[in-house]
Image (cartoon, helix red, strand yellow):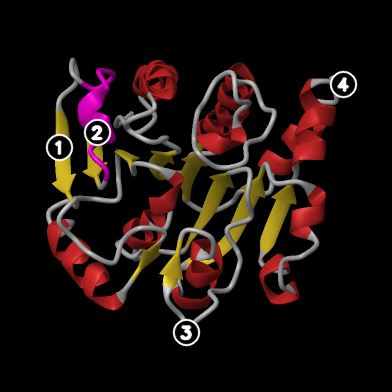
């Protein structure tokens, strides 16, 4: 299928950017929905599901800021076959919510592991080792971890065999979620604590997965991207706009969803 580019409009930030303006995009309006900032309450979930009805999990979805990274969970809800999930993020996103089972930006992966029966394994790359050690054991058992320290070893110290060994654990259709807070502050402005990965390293890491999927005829189900900053931060807006443009160009030029 042709890449479908979807912009989720929670904060209005994408309307201040230009990266999408030469593309054929579809919008999902969400600025009017209460109960969505960092947490997604039950009523908001129902409204969002309704607005997403005509959209497929396939394609490229821009989710807005990391406050809305839980939207990946709603896209995953549409998948009805066994699959694996790759998440690139500076945070584990496996923190249990302080109250009830509410879906949150900090706990959406844990939520997915508990409630999406088709999700068989998570591949989590980017967070520091110390944060990983705080994750509940039941979630660690269902996750293949590739932390910040291993990324450093792979790219800064040249031990690329680590990436190859990691990629080769994929055997089911894959959905990919990228939070740009994995990037260093020179290349993204997210409003959250950030990693030290360079953009070229992120693209190289993704390329390893794309190549492996293609060589082994494993489907790529979809990709989403989040990590916007505040719309009023004009310096950050410019950095993110250019970064989003490069990510979109990288993904569309790969033709990763195109029929072979």
Crowd tier of the residue under label 4, counting other residues whose Cα lies within 10 Å: few below 14, some 14–19, many 20 or above: few
Crowd tier of the residue under label 3, counting other residues whose Cα lies within 10 Å: few below 14, some 14–19, many 20 or above: few
Name the residue located 67 percent from the left edge and 27 percent from the top edge. Answer: 197
Cα–Cα gap, marks 2 and 3: 34 Å
Cα–Cα gap, marks 1 and 3: 34 Å
Q: Is residue 229 left or right of residue 168?
A: left
- Classify mark 1: helix, strand or loop: strand
Judging by the rendered image, the residue that carries numbered circle 2 is 5
Q: Position of residue 124 (x, y in %)?
A: 64, 50
- Classify mark 2: helix, strand or loop: strand
Judging by the rendered image, the residue that carries numbered circle 3 is 100
Q: Residue 2, can we see it?
A: no
First along the sequence among labels 4 and 2:
2
Looking at the rendered image, the quarter that the N terminus falls into is top left
- Classify mark 3: helix, strand or loop: loop
First along the sequence among labels 2 and 3:
2
Crowd tier of the residue under label 2, counting other residues whose Cα lies within 10 Å: few below 14, some 14–19, many 20 or above: many
Asked if the residue at tag 3 contacts the one at tag 1, i.e. Cβ–Cβ closer than 8 Å, the answer is: no
Crowd tier of the residue under label 1, counting other residues whose Cα lies within 10 Å: few below 14, some 14–19, many 20 or above: few
First along the sequence among labels 1 and 2:
2
Q: Which residues are magenta?
A: 11-20
Closer to viewer: mark 2 or mark 3 = 3
Looking at the rendered image, the quarter that the C terminus falls into is top left
Cα–Cα gap, marks 1 and 2: 6 Å
Q: Main secondary structure of the magenta part?
A: loop
Q: Is residue 174 left or right of residue 40?
A: right
Name the residue located 64 percent from the left edge and 21 percent from the top edge. Answer: 198
Instruction: Tell me which corner region of the image, top left, top right, bottom left or bottom right, holds residue 27.
Output: top left
Cα–Cα gap, marks 3 and 4: 43 Å
């Amino acid at each position: 299928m042709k890449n479908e580019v979807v912009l989720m409009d929670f904060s209005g930030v994408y309307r201040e950017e230009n990266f999408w303006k030469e593309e054929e995009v579809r919008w999902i309006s969400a600025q009017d929905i209460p109960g969505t900032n960092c947490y997604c309450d039950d009523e908001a979930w129902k409204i969002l599901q309704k607005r997403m009805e005509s959209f497929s999990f396939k394609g490229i979805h821009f989710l807005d800021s990391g406050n809305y990274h839980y939207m990946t969970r709603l896209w995953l809800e549409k998948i009805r076959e066994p699959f694996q999930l790759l998440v690139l993020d500076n945070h584990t996103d496996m923190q249990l919510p302080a109250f009830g089972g509410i879906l949150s930006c900090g706990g959406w992966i844990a939520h997915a592991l508990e409630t999406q029966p088709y999700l068989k394994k998570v591949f989590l790359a980017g967070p520091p080792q110390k944060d990983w050690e705080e994750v509940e054991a039941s979630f660690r058992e269902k996750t293949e971890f590739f932390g910040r320290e291993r990324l450093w070893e792979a790219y800064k110290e040249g031990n690329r065999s680590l990436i190859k060994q990691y990629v080769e654990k994929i055997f089911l259709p894959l959905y990919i979620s990228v939070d740009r807070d994995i990037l260093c502050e020179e290349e993204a402005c997210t409003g959250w604590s950030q990693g030290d990965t360079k953009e070229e390293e992120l693209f190289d890491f993704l390329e390893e997965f794309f190549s492996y999927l293609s060589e082994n005829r494993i489907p790529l189900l979809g990709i989403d991207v989040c990590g916007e900053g505040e719309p009023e931060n004009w310096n950050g807006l410019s950095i993110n706009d250019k970064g989003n443009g490069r990510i979109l160009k990288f993904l569309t030029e790969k033709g990763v969803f195109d029929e072979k």
